[in-house]
Amino acid sequence: MDSTHDLNRRKFLKHAAILGAAPLFPGGRMPEQQPQAEQVPSGVVPKKQLGHTGVQVSALGLGGYHLGSVGTDRAALEIVAKALDHGINFFDNCWEYHDGLSEERLGKALQGKRDRAFLMTKVCSHGRDKSVAMGMLEESLRRLQTDHLDLWQIHEVVYDNDPDLIFASNGAAEALTAAKQQGKVRFFGFTGHKDPSIHLRMLEHKFPFDTVQMPLNCFDANFRSFETQVLPEVTRRGMAALGMKSLGGSGEMVRHGTITAHEGLRYAMSLPVATTISGIDTMEVLDQNLQVAVNFQPLSAAEMQSLRDRSRYFASDGRFELFKMTTKYDGKVGRQQHRFPTEQALPL
Amino acid sequence: MQQSSSESIPLRQFGRHPVKISALGLGGHHLGDAPDEKTAIQIVQEAVDGGITFFDNCWEYRRGKTELWMGAGLKGRRDKVFLMTKTCPHGRDASLALQMLEESLHRLQTDHLDLWQVHGMAFDNDPELFIRPNGAAEALTKAKKDGKVRFVGFTGHQNFKVHLAMLNTGFPFDSAQMPLNVFDSNFRSFEQQVLPELNKRGIAALGMKPFGGHGDAIRAGVLTAEESLRYAMSLPVSTTITGIDSLEILRQNLRIAQNFTPMQAVEMTALRDRCKVSAADGRYELYKLSLKFDNPESRIAHGFPLDTQQSEVRDMLGAEQNTGHPFPEKHF
């Protein structure tokens, strides 16, 4: 993701009315205003098993991309500190987020607190050699001010030939194995937001991934669904499923008004996942998410079905899952390596 | 339809029907990129004289400009060509599709179309919206019954699964249009998944995007224009539609088509192999992976964001040009 998306990401809490009325979205309607006065209850975010690893992680994870979108270092540090105080220990990041700013900020925020965090970042070799991946690992460790990661994932497996490139001789899969052997990472996995078939081809290689990250939300259930096609496979293999894009990537589903932020997050967290990673760039969004996640109670099967039914019409063409349907959520480095036009030349 | 004045481009059968069309078709969208109406008319007339009989267009191209220009170019030549345009309900009602038909006939200065297709099946729910009660399927049936169109079909460039779902609606299509080029053969392939099905059912296969839409692979030196076009024309299709925005491109394509001899199977395999690596991530088929080639009408009907860089959107939103006319007034 490039920083040009910042304007649209997560601002719906403050600017819902303006964005909801945008004339270019004729299907849109004005969302209900979220009540903001609600307090975060006392208690903590519950922990869940991370697949077969024997490790427990918080059911809500803090997304790394948005840490780089926060206006100041200080505000980003405050978000991390408050998240830790409420029991969030899963911290997501990525080598390519904001050209390293997201990792640097998280590194500062975790100074002296590294042992309280389950720290993940991602590698962005995008088809290049193992040595490129290993070089990125060293950079990530330096920015994050640590000597090891709890989890290292291959980022953005979204192009059809990515599985072939990753498992080619001297490819990224070999880097994962080497990093684990060297004790620099405890666990490894991969991420992607595009197509269940690409995830399934990654799994076909029978590589011992510890984790698999994917978009999971109540719209996904009815459109090119990771929930129905990938999640059961991941669970069956004892791997940990990590959910993301619970509200469409930038709150598209909430802005449109089909679901509230609370409903979207509760749905995603009620699935059989180890954690749901959520991008948080203001205290308001953190509080909104903590209201759901502290002392989390999953939805009943009937409540989940009702949310899927409510979302079904707008799910069926992918209009609020642009990461599956367009190039909007595909990052700069991957585009370069795959010889795709830039985000400016191909915005959607 | 009469024979064209020149028979130098091979003619092929239109699916199961005893009608012949030229193996090269003139794409309507790029006609709107011609510098002015005069050039566009010249392109159309020279194309007819060069042996092209198949003319493609669409209600939503360039806000009507391409239909108007093609209509002007075909004045006095209507009976020499097989004229197609497309309707753009994008999931909306049959009545809207029929209203678009009347507009298209008016712009094209004719009382009937040889082929009318439903444009841009792109989204997973398009087939369901097409076949529903009061959907576009009913418009196709009515237009045919009323004698306003001889044949009906559908088009799309996103996803072969959507094409297969359209075929599985059971609607009696005469044609189906899809991207066919050497890159497609190795990437989410219409050639492999859809083309054999059409041949089996006697539905005319209309190829498009023989150069990948904008010719990026040719500019990158992966293959030549001649190789691209010959590959596409060597597939079992009724015609290959290609966008032409200048007399220079027209003459290049006419020359290739007039001298056309089909590639041998071994040549086709060699070309597929040469292009395989750059086909594998879809970099030269962005229409399958992005909304780059999806027109505003389609995005609006499906609630997708518009691309403000797109020519249609610029025409639509540009304050200076937005006169309420279908395209900038100065062209009238």
Image: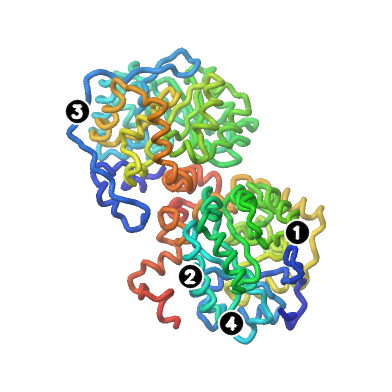
Q: Which mark is residue B73?
A: 4
Percent x, y of residue B242: 63, 67
**What's the chain of the residue with tag 3?**
A
Left or right placement of residue A323 versus residue B53 in this view: left
Above or below for A150 versus A167: above
Mark 4 or 2: the one toward you: 2
Tags 1 and 4 both on a single chain: yes
In x, y percent, where is residue A286?
27, 31
Q: Is residue B322 above or below residue B159?
A: below
In front here: A102 or B148? B148
Residue A344 shows in this picture: yes
Assess whether mark 1 and mark 2 are in contact (beta carbons under 8 angstroms).
no
Task: Answer above or below: position of A226 versus B88.
Answer: above
* Residue marked by disc 2: B99
Q: Quadrant of residue B249?
A: bottom right
Frontmost residue, B101 versus A185: B101
Q: Mark 3 falls on what kind of element?
A: loop
Mark closest to the chain's N terminus, 4 or 2: 4
Q: What is the spatial separation of the Cα atoms under label 2 and label 1, in whole angstroms?
A: 34 Å
| Label 1 Cα neighbours within 10 Å, binned few <14 / some 14-19 / many ≥20 | some
Give how far across and how far down residue A180 sits, in percent: 52, 19
Q: Residue furthest top?
A: A54
Residue type highlighted by circle 2 = Gln
Q: Are marks 1 and 3 in contact (CB under 8 Å)?
A: no
Q: Chain of mark 1?
A: B
**At label 1, which amino acid type do we have?**
Pro
Residue that label 1 marks: B236
**Do the numbered discs 3 and 2 sit on residues whose CB atoms are within 8 Å?**
no
Q: Which residue is mark 3?
A: A39
| Residue shown at the point (24%, 39%) measured from the top left | A34
Q: Specify the subunit that label 2 lies on.
A: B
